[in-house]
Amino acid sequence: MFSRKDADSRDSARTAQPDKVVDKSVNGASPALTGVARPPAPRQTSTVEKKQADKKSGADKKKETIQQPYRRYWINEDGTHEHHLKVGKRQEKLTDMFQNLMTGKKRDGHQDEQPLSLMANWVDVMRNEKEKLAEQKNSTNTSQTLAQKYGKCQEVVGRGAFGIVRVAHKTDAKDPKREQLYAVKEFKQRPGESAKKYQKRLTAEFCISSSMAHPNVINTLDLLQDDKGLYCEVMEYCSGGDLYTLVLAAGQLEVTEADCFFKQLMRGVEYMHEMGVAHRDLKPENLLLTQHGSIKITDFGNGECFRMAWEKEAHMTAGLCGSAPYIAPEEYVDQEFDPRAVDVWACGIIYMAMRTGRHLWRVAQKGEDEFFDRYLEDRREEAGYRPIEVLRRRQCRNVIYSILDPNPTRRLTAHQVLFSEWVKEIKVCRAGDEGF
């Protein structure tokens, strides 16, 4: 299932070398010629021939454009790299994949029935999405206040248990030709939830998310009600989609890509923890991307403050929340734990998902999952746990093992991860540094 590649020097993607152009033109006269020959008069090109030549040139250019492969990222000559993420192309590919799955077709080289694949989980989500299309059509209205401040809400870009996320389009007052885009998250009232609890829950989430100011944390702008009384949270719009669909469409990410995203994620997590906030639901679906490859942590619905500004010590927490493959083992034990260690654990699972396109296990609960039980045994052996051993660099493997330590008191902190030998050497793209 996995193959190990031993080549530390080939960790980053290689840039393509330009082909050498050989000059086949011959300077000087031919040996068969003597004396000075008058150059022949230039042939006049007819209008019809010009049009045909232009048409042929245009067709050749179009053909070249079509043949050029889409590149998600590339490495520049100076060693820096850039990302270019197209959601439209990705959604096109995912739609084709879903249709093939629904008609019984398999993708070449992929066994979609494997229980730990991201594809298996995605198919279930897509089936649920189709059932909610009718509901989407019934929620197109927005209040005048929301429309005036942020423009008209149009296409749906996200959907979950909380509600839906739409893109609001507002014409730039300074330049009518430009549009300002916002993500508008519409919250639903949970079954049996009182209006008071509903308002308190959303206000708590907004207070946490709006207090954050970091390049790798989503910028939350406003919380207001629409004409139906539903609360809407307005955030910056990330045109690159989310990390989950990127990994799903790509199968798995290249080393340079995954490392860049991971370091950005750890920076965002370190910042949150310094602010006294734990996310408690980190997963690829909650990591948004800008077109240029900046990661943005979003959805603080399960977030909690473990330390107030005037406090020095962190409060322990309890309770199970999040998505099963990313939940840390201590959450299944009936006792309190440090929520920061839970976030770090999830980051390790996310990195492995980026590199392999798979979950390591269904649930990190001893005796409940054969893959997790095997991990607990193999991590103590010299040969190690095979899915992690496929990572080519020793320093990388060591950090992942330390992040995924079942004992939370031994687990690395976000700060320690960032200062590890491996992560310190990771080069982050300019967009990731500046958050654009």
Image: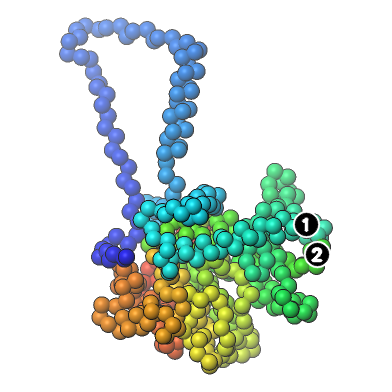
Q: Residue at x 37, y 68 (%)?
A: 425
Three-letter amino acid code at the position of disc 2? Lys
Three-letter amino acid code at the position of disc 1? Asn
Closer to the camera, 214 or 220? Answer: 220
Return the disc, 1 or 2, that comes first in the chain's sequence: 1
Closer to the camera, 272 or 228? Answer: 228
Q: Residue at x 34, y 59 (%)?
A: 12
Q: Is residue 180 above or below residue 49?
A: below
The circle on residue 337 is: none
| Local secondary structure at mark 1 | loop
Q: Residue at x 67, y 72 (%)?
A: 210
The residue at which mark 1 appears reads as: 141
In percent of width and height, residue 13 lies at 35, 56
In the figure, is residue 394 to the left or right of 252?
left
Q: Residues within 10 Å of mark 1 (few under 14, many from 20)?
A: some
The circle on residue 228 is: 2
In percent of width and height, residue 36 lies at 25, 7
